[in-house]
Amino acid sequence: MTQRRALITGGAGFIGSTVADALVADGWSVTVLDNLSSGKRAQVPAVAAFVEADIRSDEAATCIREGRFDLVCHLAAQIDVRKSVTDPKFDVDVNIGGSVNIMHAVHASGHKTRLTFASTGGAVYGDFVQPPNLEDYAKDPESPYGIAKFATELYLSYYARIHGLDYVALRFANVYGPRQDPHGEAGVVAIFCQRIIDGKALTVFGDGGQTRDYVYVGDVARAHLLAANHAGIPAGKVDARAFNLGTQVETSVVELATTLMRAAGKEVPLQHAPARAGEQRRSCVSIEKAKAGLGWIPQVSLEEGLRRTYDWFAAR
């Protein structure tokens, strides 16, 4: 049997490298494409091929057109909601322009390729619906980041209807776990882990009552395997090929902080700062469609996932 070939954009990053590990373990031949702006070369599996390129580049498009990949996992992105607010032009350039470059290259390759897209369940629905959010709920994102992710799904839906592109959009809730960057704006769990290790106070923006749905990175990687092996989903409206990935549980920032300190066995103070622009109040996704359509359910509880994550940071 011919070994299946996969390319992962952003495969040197936190989620991408975890997906790469899962595909390698499942017997795939893996190529990672990453510009290393935030990803780390050391996180790429040793057996994977590596291409240093930006998703907006001709080099990335050529790699995909000529690579004859059975699977393209598109995870590379500008991931910072706050940066999208302060520099929406850059966010559009990377998250829409880069994504269209990738999907057009998949189409132009002429090869039968499944594309999985890392979309957002945490930012696409906005604050005007009652969580947990279903895939077909109205979309009204609070940030340019959420707008760009949904715009990319609309482009994917167009390519599916007009050009027959085979894709699955995976709408992540708030993903956390080992390898997450504790120094950026994205990734509150990683930031809190590092501050607890350093014995510093945890900064909570606003009153800390804003909620998120926290899903462990290993569970998200497993969803990519299931999506890669799925028999196929007929083209239709944009939500037809979208699947929320979360836990269907809302956790406030204050609750997250106390649960993490309990997992760490160490307490530090909480300090409050002004609420941030573009940040929605509540976010939680329904995962019933992923259960029924992909056979996916999260396996790692928040308490267990936080313990694993803290232990990973502490060991470093």
Image: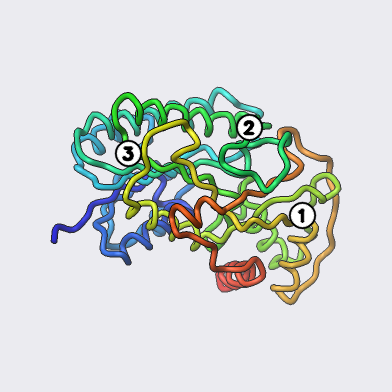
- Is the C terminus in the top left, top right, bottom left or bottom right quadrant? bottom right
- Residue farthest toward the left in the current orientation of the protein: 1
Could you classify mark 3 by the number of other residues whose Cα lies within 10 Å: few (under 14), some (14-19), or many (20 or more)?
A: many
Q: Give x and y (percent) for residue 43.
A: 41, 59
Instruction: Estimate the spatial distance between the alpha carbons at disc 1 and disc 3, rounded to whole Å.
Output: 37 Å
Where on the picture, by quarter, is residue 162?
top left
Colouring scheme applied when the structure was drawn:
rainbow
Are circles 3 and 2 on residues that touch, CB within 8 Å? no
Mark linked to residue 166? 3
Mark linked to residue 252? 1
**For the residue labelled by badge 1, is the local secondary structure a helix, a strand or a loop?**
strand
The residue that label 2 is drawn on is: 138
| Residue at x 26% of width, y 64% of height | 27
Instruction: Estimate the spatial distance between the alpha carbons at disc 3 and disc 2, rounded to whole Å.
Output: 24 Å
**For the residue labelled by badge 2, is the local secondary structure a helix, a strand or a loop?**
loop
Mark linked to residue 212? none
Direction from residue 55 to residue 244 in the image, left or right: right
- As rendered, which of 10 and 196 lies closer to the eye? 10
Could you classify mark 2 by the number of other residues whose Cα lies within 10 Å: few (under 14), some (14-19), or many (20 or more)?
A: few
Q: Give x and y (percent) for residue 54.
A: 38, 36
Residue 262 to residue 271: above or below: below
Instruction: Estimate the spatial distance between the alpha carbons at disc 2 and disc 1, rounded to whole Å.
Output: 23 Å
Tag 2 or tag 3, which sits nearer the N-term?
2
Residue 109 to residue 177: above or below: above
Q: Give x and y (percent) for residue 119.
A: 51, 41
Mark in the foreground, 1 or 3: 3
